[in-house]
Image (tube, coloured by chain):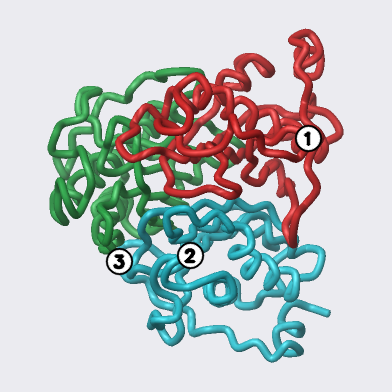
Chain colours: A green, B red, C cyan
Amino acid sequence: MSAEAKIAALGLALPTAGAALANYVPAVRAGGLLIVSGQLPLVGGQLDDSCKGKVGHDLFNEAGQAAARLAALNVLAQARAALGSLDRIKRVVRLGGFINAAPGFHALPAVMNGASDLMVEVFGEKGRHARTTVGVSELPLDAAVEIEAMFEVE
Amino acid sequence: MSAEAKIAALGLALPTAGAALANYVPAVRAGGLLIVSGQLPLVGGQLDDSCKGKVGHDLFNEAGQAAARLAALNVLAQARAALGSLDRIKRVVRLGGFINAAPGFHALPAVMNGASDLMVEVFGEKGRHARTTVGVSELPLDAAVEIEAMFEVE
Amino acid sequence: MSAEAKIAALGLALPTAGAALANYVPAVRAGGLLIVSGQLPLVGGQLDDSCKGKVGHDLFNEAGQAAARLAALNVLAQARAALGSLDRIKRVVRLGGFINAAPGFHALPAVMNGASDLMVEVFGEKGRHARTTVGVSELPLDAAVEIEAMFEVE
């Protein structure tokens, strides 16, 4: 099943791809790669309170995972906007996950799984990616997570 | 206008490209990409006090932007040193911005605009890039910002 | 001398390449690049106490360097597992180093040299890479360092 068909079958609603807020753009293609800017867990361009603050203090594992999944949905929305269709993605190459972590919160990989699981739901085996997950001290808008991506594209 | 002509027209002085300080190099070319190592806001190889410390505590929005612009000038200096001329850059693909953020300081994108704006001043439309901006707890030499880059090159 | 011959000559034992812990994989190849996921300083899949905690508080410069070297050995183990042989690596393009830094600890580049030096020991001139080193607030399992890599491959 193609990625777009899978999105439909799963009943996933991709967020509206946010416009560029400054002198950068949501995604750039270079050779066979598509680089997607760091995405926040926005809905309708807004950051809900449930996706704000420090994971391990203001929100916890499952809510953190949900925020990561939402940021990853924004990654897909940007990729679709850049490519016309997610079916032009040959492989999810890499996700970078930045978690707004409370002091002493180390369960970062479990939070990031919210993003990784989405990629495999949508793309199957070619959704399995390299990833780097780290805990950072601050994120834009006080978001709980930020996720960037590299895709191999047709 | 070419990027080198634009640098001249803007009267921008690129810093001297710093030498490698260890077993790494300022930039590596792989296929059609040039990867530039994380750059600090150095002038003459030195980090001025105005570019040190935590944004939101030791320095504030405009000074943070100025530091980001200076780090981005160092990125361009390294790219020119690696390529011979900035005119061999086809596209600024991605900037990664790491901001030494004070606790509770979330205006990271505004700081990073200091770097993004420079790219568009110099390269025009092909200077518009994907980017990821995060707040980190510490940076080398206590710099206020560190910026890395990926370029598509001839 | 080839990279594999050098590994043998140096008597380096690469750790066992850890299996994927979730819906991501240790390394992905895209075109001429191999992207390796962020690696921790694991031995036998375990994180020793000597490689845990904040550099500048729980462990210090030399122990931090040793942890960075160990994480980099895991990077090589994953690259070998993905490629069959390290001799298929044409160039170490980039290392990303995330240091679990204690407040006020700025000697991040010295810690990261533990990883960079290993690359040059094993690959010689083609081991010299671009790199980005930042201090982060938390890492998975409370590891002292995490290192990711991009290689150019045959």
The residue sitting at the right extreme is: B84
Q: Quadrant of the N terminus of chain B?
A: top right
Q: Is residue A63 above or below residue B51?
A: below
Circle on res. A37? none
For badge 1, the amino acid type reads Gly
On screen, residue B51 above or below A150: above
In this rendering, which labeled residue sits more in front, label 3 or label 1?
1
Q: Kindly identify which residue carries mark 3.
A: C22
- Tally of marks: 3
Which residue is located at x 34 percent, y 33 percent? B105
Image position of B110 (left or right of B122): left
**Residue at numbered disc 2:** C56
Query: In the rendered structure, which amino acid carries the disc numbered 3?
Result: Ala
Answer yes or no: is residue B103 visible: yes
Q: Position of residue C141 (x, y in %)?
A: 33, 70
Q: Position of residue C67 (x, y in %)?
A: 52, 74
Query: Can residue C26 be seen by looking at this rendering?
Result: no
**Residue at (53% x, 23% y) in the render:** B63
Q: Quadrant of residue A15?
A: top left
Label 3 vs label 2, nearer the camera: 2
Looking at the rendered image, the quarter that the C terminus of chain B falls into is top right
Q: Name the element at disc 2.
A: loop
Asked if badge 3 and badge 1 are on a common chain, one would say no
Horizontal side of residue A137 vs B82, given as left or right:
left
Q: 10 Å neighbourhood of mark 3: few (<14), some, or many (≥20)?
A: few
The chain to which mark 3 is attached is C
User: Where does label 1 land, which residue?
Assistant: B44
Q: Nearer the viewer, residue A153 or B60?
A: B60
Report helix, strand or loop for mark 1.
loop
